[in-house]
């Protein structure tokens, strides 16, 4: 793991991210160490190397001390469910179908037309992570990831760091 001073890696903290657009979760809810690993790889432009993370690694447990994503709600703003429509990938037209000049013309595009699929999106005021490590280094590293979740390339799951608090 990293060579960051041990004292800086032992601070328990609560990290709050503000969620700006609906988040579409993958099958496995993201953990803070996973997001930080992706951010470290993006910063170094190297996904083949194991990068040091500013989190405490618990050798006894065999994992970083970091929580999964938790939805944060307030009395005025709860967790909302939104259906998010996204266009699926375009499929190339098979050459066999392109050669069939006697086939009827379909105005709906047929099987190769892009389809609009709905995904369950969730929107709440903020996202929370609990961890043990260096909160300032975590915030600095998370600046590499402006979006999380599925559909991040289309603007879903836009986040910004709200605050870190000792826990």
Image (tube, rainbow, N blue to C red):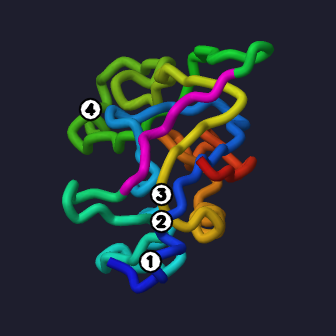
Whichever of labels 2 and 3 marks the residue nearer the N terminus, that label is 2
**Camera-side mark, 3 or 4:** 3
Residue at the location (38% across, 22% down)?
A: 110
CA neighbours of label 1 inside 10 A, class few (<14), some (14 to 19), many (20+): few
Gap between marks 2 and 4 measured at Cα: 67 Å
**Residue under numbered circle 2:** 10
Range shown magenta: 65-73
Up/down of 21 relative to 43, above or below:
above
Look at the numbered discs 2 and 3 and tell me whether their residues touch, using CB distance below 8 Å.
yes
Look at the numbered discs 1 and 2 and tell me whether their residues touch, using CB distance below 8 Å.
yes
Under circle 4, the secondary element is loop
Residue 33, horizontal then vertical, whole percent: 41, 57
Up/down of 166 relative to 9, above or below:
above
Up/down of 46 relative to 99, above or below:
below
**Camera-side mark, 2 or 4:** 2
Name the one closer to the observer, 1 or 115.
1
View extreme (bottom): residue: 3
Name the one closer to the observer, 96 or 46.
46
**Residue under numbered circle 4:** 100
Residue at the location (65% across, 67% down)?
A: 136
Q: In which quarter of the image is residue 88?
A: top left
Label of residue 67 in the image: none
Whichever of labels 3 and 4 marks the residue nearer the N terminus, that label is 4
**Residue under numbered circle 1:** 6
**Residue under numbered circle 3:** 132
């Amino acid at each position: 793991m990293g060579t960051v001073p041990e004292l800086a890696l032992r601070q328990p903290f609560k990290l709050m991210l503000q969620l700006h657009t609906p988040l579409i979760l993958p099958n496995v809810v993201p953990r803070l160490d996973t997001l930080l690993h992706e951010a470290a790889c993006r910063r170094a432009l190297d996904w083949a190397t194991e990068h040091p993370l500013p989190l405490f690694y618990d050798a006894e447990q065999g994992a970083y001390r970091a929580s999964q994503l938790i939805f944060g709600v307030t009395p005025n703003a709860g967790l909302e469910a939104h259906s998010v429509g996204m266009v699926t990938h375009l499929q190339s037209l098979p050459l066999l179908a392109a050669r069939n000049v006697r086939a009827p013309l379909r105005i709906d595009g047929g099987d190769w037309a892009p389809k609009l699929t709905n995904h369950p999106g969730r929107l709440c005021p903020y996202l929370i992570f609990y961890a043990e490590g260096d909160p300032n280094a975590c915030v600095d590293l998370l600046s590499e990831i402006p979006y999380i979740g599925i559909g991040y390339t289309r603007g879903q799951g836009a986040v910004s760091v709200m605050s870190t608090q000792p826990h």
